[in-house]
């Protein structure tokens, strides 16, 4: 991968986005040591944009920078996971209630198409694409309710929550539970049933938490 492969934005932004995705996708595993020099050589750039990217990732608590000993990918902090899950639950309960009242037809079609593609991920065994579709499903709900900035706000605090979600999908191939919950939420929006839709959303966002102890046992080095 080189600087020329970036699509848009500055070198720093490209490196930041690439590293962020690799950390969320667990391609860069929690506890792994990385260096500015190594990343600069990989991207064929100077160390300045890499250093700036590292600082931005550290602000999101995805990197831990130790001046005398180096930089490591932060381990998953379950307190951060719970805070992000709590915030999403509180907000998305409201989002789904709004969606039951009024929601654009073209975005309802997007939600339905999204679920169809999720089912294809089960057939193909592609957990990374399923994660992306899960994100798009929720983002579409926010955008359909004209809460775009709210989505961008919570996305910034979701890093640790996203990693445990990715870990669950990678380690538990029973993905139909996630998809069936998305279907239920979609059907209840169609039926305009805000009470049941809110309850379905709450159950959906608690799914990862129910399995966190098992994930800690299986991947002890990934957690603080």
Image: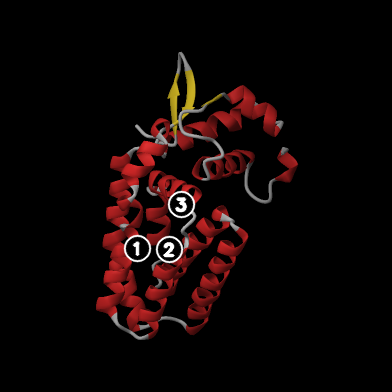
* Residue beneath the point at 37% across and 83% down: 102
Q: Earlier in the sequence, mark 2 or mark 1?
A: 2
Q: Is residue 23 left or right of residue 44?
A: left
Tell me if mark 1 has few (under 14), some (14-19) or many (20+) residues whose alpha carbon lies within 10 angstroms of its own: some
Q: Quadrant of the C terminus?
A: top left
- Which residue is disc 3 drawn over? 172
Q: Mark 3, residues whose alpha carbon is within 10 Å: few (<14), some, or many (≥20)?
A: few
Of the residues under marks 2 and 3, which one precedes in the sequence?
3
Q: Are marks 2 and 1 in contact (CB under 8 Å)?
A: yes
Question: In the picture provided, is 21 more to the left or to the right than 6?
Answer: left
90, above or below 144, in the image? above
> How busy is the neighbourhood of tag 2: few (under 14 within 10 Å), some, or many (20 plus)?
some
Q: Earlier in the sequence, mark 3 or mark 1?
A: 3
Q: Residue at x 35, y 80 (%)?
A: 188
Q: Which residue is mark 2?
A: 178
Q: Residue at x 52, y 81 (%)?
A: 106
Q: Alpha-carbon distance for marks 2 and 1?
A: 7 Å
Is residue 65 or residue 185 the one in the foreground? Answer: 185
SS type, badge 3: loop
| Color theme of the render | secondary structure
Q: Residue 168, position in %: x, y?
A: 43, 49
Residue 180 location (% of width, % of height): 42, 70
The image position of residue 88, as x and y in percent, is: 32, 58
Looking at the image, is mark 2 or mark 3 nearer the viewer?
A: 3
Q: SS at mark 2? A: helix
Work out how far the residue at label 2 is from the one at label 3, CA to CA, in angstroms: 11 Å
- Tell me the residue at 51%/32% (across/down): 54
Q: Quadrant of the N terminus?
A: top right
Instruction: Point out the residue furthest to the top here.
Output: 68
Residue 76 spot, x, y in % from top left: 38, 37
In this figure, which residue is indicated by the disc labeled 1?
204
């Amino acid at each position: 991968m080189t600087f020329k492969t970036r699509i848009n934005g500055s070198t720093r932004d490209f490196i930041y986005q690439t590293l962020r995705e690799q950390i969320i996708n667990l391609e860069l595993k929690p506890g792994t040591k990385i260096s500015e020099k190594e990343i600069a050589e990989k991207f064929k750039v100077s160390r300045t944009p890499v250093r700036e990217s590292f600082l931005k990732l550290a602000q999101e608590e995805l990197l831990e920078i130790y001046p005398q000993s180096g930089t490591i990918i932060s381990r998953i902090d379950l307190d951060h996971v719970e805070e992000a899950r709590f915030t999403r639950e509180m907000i998305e309960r409201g989002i789904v209630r709004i969606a039951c009242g009024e929601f654009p037809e073209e975005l309802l079609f997007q939600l339905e198409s999204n679920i169809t593609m999720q089912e294809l991920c089960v057939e193909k065994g592609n957990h990374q694409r399923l994660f992306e579709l899960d994100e798009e499903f929720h983002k579409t709900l926010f955008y359909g309710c004209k809460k775009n900035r709210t989505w961008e706000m919570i996305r910034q605090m979701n890093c640790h929550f996203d990693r445990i979600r990715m870990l669950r999908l990678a380690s538990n191939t029973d993905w139909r539970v996630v998809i069936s919950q998305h279907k239920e939420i979609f059907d209840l929006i169609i039926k305009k049933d805000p009470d049941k839709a809110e309850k379905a959303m709450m159950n959906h966002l608690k799914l990862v938490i129910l399995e966190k102890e098992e994930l800690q046992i299986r991947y002890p080095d990934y957690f603080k």
